[in-house]
Image: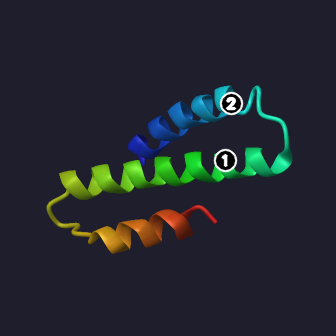
Amino acid sequence: MILGIIVEIFFKVIYKLSVRNITGRIKVFFVRISVAALSNWLVLFTVDEFMKSMILSIRSEILLRCCLRY
């Protein structure tokens, strides 16, 4: 949970800086989805690597990354 909060703050700053000069709601939406998916994947991957009791396949990580946020 602590890792998730740190990564979320870091990626929120990246998102804000990325959309500063982007016009169009659709482009901003896709940037938001991309940043959210990347941050979720990073947290899941890191936790999966450090916890010996948790084992996820790449397919599971991708599915969780896409579905966890929405």
The Cα–Cα distance between marks 2 and 1, rounded to whole angstroms, is 9 Å
Q: Is residue 12 left or right of residue 23?
A: left
**Mark 1 residue crowding within 10 angstroms, few (<14) / some (14–19) / many (20+):** some
Residue 52 vertical position relative to residue 59 in the rendered view, above or below: above
Residue marked by disc 1: 32
Q: Is residue 28 left or right of residue 63?
A: right
Residue marked by disc 2: 16
Extreme left residue here? 52
Tell me which residue sits at (66%, 26%) in the image: 17
Residue 31 vertical position relative to residue 11 in the rendered view, above or below: below
Extreme right residue here? 24
Of callouts 2 and 1, which one flags the residue occurring earlier in the amino acid sequence? 2
Tell me which residue sits at (45%, 45%) in the image: 4
Residue 61, image x and y in percent?
37, 66
Question: Which quarter of the rendered picture does the C terminus lie within?
Answer: bottom right
Is residue 54 or residue 19 the one in the foreground? 19
Residue 29, image x and y in percent?
74, 51
* Amino acid type, label 1: Arg
Q: Is residue 23 left or right of residue 34?
A: right
Residue 51, image x and y in percent?
20, 57
Tell me which residue sits at (39%, 48%) in the image: 42
Where on the picture, by quarter, is residue 35?
top right
Residue 18, image x and y in percent?
66, 31
Q: Are marks 2 and 1 in contact (CB under 8 Å)?
A: no
* Amino acid type, label 2: Lys
Tell me which residue sits at (26%, 58%) in the image: 48
Secondary structure beneath disc 1?
helix
Residue 63 vertical position relative to residue 20 in the rendered view, above or below: below
